[in-house]
Image (cartoon, grey):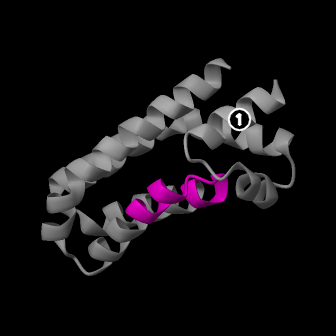
Amino acid sequence: MEEKKKNFLIQNGVDVEAGIENTMDFETYNEILLDFCESFPQEVNKFNEYKNAGDMVNYEIIVHALKSNCRTLGFNEMGEMFYAHEQASKQNDINYVNTHYEELINAVKKTYNILNTYKGL
């Protein structure tokens, strides 16, 4: 089962080896990833609310945390997108956030689908 899960993630662009290295072993990685699966929708709702309210301070906090989680777990592309939004929100660049928001949401949906499928393996 472990190999099946690893292969699924690798096929979907996740740097599983880095994630395992960051979390000590596959068992720990799997546990943290499953926790992330559960919390991801609530975190997305939070940053959506902050974005809609123009609250760049709290938007920065949530995208920073998501960036860190994604990078730790090997979702590097998603982590880089959150990083770009973190940097923009630090500069109160609402224009960047709004302009690139749909791109971020599409990547979030893709990542969420990967996470949901992973949970079912």
- x and y percentages locating residue 94 in the rendered image: 16, 68
Q: Which residues are magenta?
A: 70-82
Residue pointed to by mark 1 = 7
Main SS of the magenta part reads helix
Identify the residue shown where x is 85% and y is 39%: 27
Picture quarter with the N terminus: top right
**Left or right, 65 with reference to 88:** right
Residue 35 visible: no
Amino acid under disc 1: Asn
| Element type where label 1 sits in the image | helix
Residue 14, above or below 65: above
Identify the residue shown where x is 63% and y is 18%: 120
Residue 38 colored magenta? no
Residue 97, above or below 2: below
User: Within the image, what quadrant is residue 93 found in?
Assistant: bottom left
User: Within the image, what quadrant is residue 82 found in?
Assistant: bottom left
- x and y percentages locating residue 54 in the rendered image: 17, 61
Residue 2, above or below 101: above
Outermost residue toward the bottom? 91
Identify the residue shown where x is 29% and y is 45%: 105
**Left or right, 72 with reference to 105:** right
User: Neighbour class for label 1 at 10 Å: few (<14), some, many (≥20)?
Assistant: some
- x and y percentages locating residue 61 in the rendered image: 42, 65
